Amino acid sequence: MTAPFTTLDQFRACLIGLPGPDAAAQQGARTRNSQLTKPPGALGRLEDLAIWYAGWRADPRPTIQAPQVIVFAGNHGVAARGVSAFPPEVTAQMVANFNAGGAAVNQLARTAGARIDVHALDLDRPTADFTQAPAMSEPDCVAALASGWEAVDTQADLLVVGEMGIGNTTSAAAIACALYGKDPADWTGRGTGVDDNGLALKTQVVAQGVARHAAANGPSPDGLAALASLGGREIAAMAGAIAAARTHGIPVILDGFICCAAAATLQATVPGALDHAIAGHQSAEAAHAALLDRLGKAPLLTLGLRLGEGSGAALAINVLKGALACHSGMATFAEAGVTDT
């Protein structure tokens, strides 16, 4: 599916016109939920998840049959500042591992019955060091958004997006800081496992990048301006894919800190742009909890994961599948011949 935009303003217009959930399907799901053979509310949040999913799929009794996991990879010029415990060539090496089926996300996607697609975005052309210049020009940012948009299978019924890119927790921290303020140290974590000196350097780099682009991002930062000036191609691609999913009524499970930073650029541009998305997990990256709070998303899982790749969200697919199995597969009181009063 060709992306319907060639500029950031056109992409912003797409976000403004995003469709909402199907009210009739949501009401049908609520009615069914009230008739299932269980005490009211006994399945807790699983009930809310099923109703939420039903609305976005326009089906009061849905199931998940075709989940898609997409991993986007990009290289960051800021990695040359020494902000990661790993060298940039690891990005391409991990892309080969994803394609060979050897990464954690491959195993988790397989367990969830999800197809997995891998998109490497100009790995031989890193973004600019955002302490010196905008990470991406508008054409480069638009191209990355379009790559994400076009990677979504319109026949999928659930989407997870993940990433690989040495230096991308630095980029995500800078985006969060630009959008939400606070001290750069509040948003900057250890990522791949940098030591104390590495963390201090990384925090300084985030501060420099945010300060460098403060005038361009303005007093009320625009999400797309922050994405272009501080982001990466894989971060922009995740944002494009999340937006595309909404246009096709495909619910999204968000992954960790980097994925949520990508999602935050959409929410900051058009409030409500993430209503079709839930948080798969809260990662061990220090600022992820604060970012989830800003997005208004409660995580399904909290397991201390900090791998990225879409791994935590892929694991959460089975939680959502369980919610729908109960909602759509359980008998009603009438069907089971059970007295409900």
Image (spheres, rainbow, N blue to C red):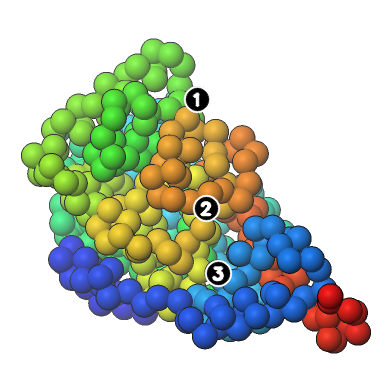
Who comes first in sequence, dot 1 or dot 2?
1
User: For the point 8% across and 39% down, which residue is it?
Assistant: 215
Q: Earlier in the sequence, mark 1 or mark 3?
A: 3
Instruction: Bin the neighbour count of mark 3 within 10 Å (Cα to Cα): few under 14, some 14-19, many 20 and up.
Output: many
Amino acid type at image mark 1:
Gly
Q: Secondary structure at mark 3?
A: helix
Distance from Cα at disc 1 to Cα at disc 3: 36 Å
Residue sticking out furthest to the top: 197
Residue 2 position, x and y percent, is 31, 78
How crowded pointer 2 is (Cα within 10 Å; few <14, some 14-19, many 20+) is rated as many
Image quadrant containing the C terminus: bottom right
Q: Is residue 109 visible?
A: no
Name the residue type under label 3: Trp
Three-letter amino acid code at the position of disc 2: Ala
- Marks 1 and 3: which is nearer the front? 3
Figure check: 174 above or below 57 = above
Q: Mark on residue 193? A: 1
The residue identified by callout 2 is 279
Q: Nearer the viewer, residue 123 or 290?
A: 290
Vertical side of 251 occupied by 73: above or below: above
Front-most of residues 120 and 302: 302
The residue tagged 3 is 52
Q: Is residue 17 visible?
A: yes
